[in-house]
């Protein structure tokens, strides 16, 4: 695991890029600079002991600032019982959030859950054209109601290939990600995994410290 510190480099994002026009390169550098700036805000939250849900909310929030026109959410299993937990920004329509929360973990025909199941990116450029004829999931069924036209999902894969769910993006226009956006999705997913692993590791250490302190108190009581 990488050292936990603020940095001018990126977590999970390869900055190497093929030659492009001067305007494209300038846009790339601007978006990479924004990524680094926002990444350091997440690192500060982790260092300050912020609860994981708030850290993930911040990752989803900055994802929307980096991927233009997106509504963002993070779909991850609960550390204790494995039940899916959805962390979404306020921009995601509440009714559509409810539909996403009703997704079954084995729902292989919708990008958010497919990315988790298959451990690879899942992009649907035109969601309305891809609604199954039979037994569509709630997120497919309600997409026309909330004018959700495209859905992208990047798997969250941590150290030792440990799966942590997926990072989802939804748009009101049908479109696919550019090469730059694909790389930014990888970086944002890496940042989410970094947050999950470090925050859960800290919480596990805190729990261990509390248990040890409780055992010490019991031992002192028994010895008196």
Image (cartoon, helix red, strand yellow):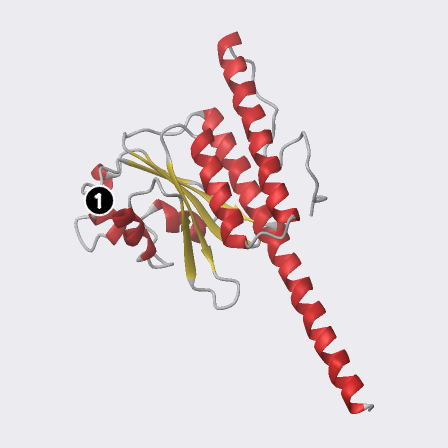
Relative image position of residue 167 (x, y in whole percent): 45, 44
- In the rendered image, the residue lying farthest to the top is 22
- In the rendered image, the residue lying farthest to the front is 224
**Residue ID at (26%, 34%):** 126
Residue carrying label 1: 131
Picture layout, residue 38 above or below residue 110? above
Q: Is residue 165 left or right of residue 195?
A: left
Q: Quadrant of residue 42?
A: top right
Q: Is residue 51 left or right of residue 154?
A: right
Q: Quadrant of residue 6?
A: top right
Viewer-nearest residue: 45 or 186: 45
Badge 1 local density, few (<14 within 10 Å), some, or many (20+)? some
**Residue ID at (60%, 58%):** 200
Relative image position of residue 66 (x, y in whole percent): 47, 29
Viewer-nearest residue: 51 or 159: 51
**Residue ID at (36%, 29%):** 69
Evaluate whether residue 94 shows in this view. Answer: yes
Q: Is residue 223 left or right of residue 7?
A: right
**Residue ID at (65%, 68%):** 207
């Amino acid at each position: 695991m990488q050292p936990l510190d603020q940095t001018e480099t990126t977590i999970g994002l390869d900055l190497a890029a093929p030659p492009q026009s001067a305007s494209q390169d300038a846009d790339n550098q601007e978006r990479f600079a924004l990524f680094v700036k926002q990444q350091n805000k997440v690192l500060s939250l982790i260092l300050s002991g912020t609860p994981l849900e708030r850290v993930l909310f911040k990752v989803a929030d900055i994802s929307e600032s980096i991927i233009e026109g997106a509504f963002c959410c993070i779909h991850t299993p609960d550390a204790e019982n494995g039940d899916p937990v959805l962390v979404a920004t306020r921009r995601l329509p509440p009714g559509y959030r409810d539909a996403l929360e009703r997704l079954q973990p084995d729902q292989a025909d919708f990008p958010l859950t497919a990315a988790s199941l298959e451990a690879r990116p899942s992009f649907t450029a035109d969601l309305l054209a891809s609604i199954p004829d039979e037994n569509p999931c709630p997120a497919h069924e309600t997409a026309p109601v909330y004018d959700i036209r495209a859905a992208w999902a990047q798997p969250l894969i941590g150290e030792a290939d440990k799966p942590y769910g997926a990072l989802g993006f939804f748009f009101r226009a049908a479109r696919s990600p550019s090469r730059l956006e694909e790389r930014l999705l990888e970086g944002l997913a890496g940042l989410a995994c970094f947050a999950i692993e470090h925050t859960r590791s800290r919480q596990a250490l805190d729990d261990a410290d509390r248990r040890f302190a409780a055992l010490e108190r019991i031992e002192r009581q028994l010895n008196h």
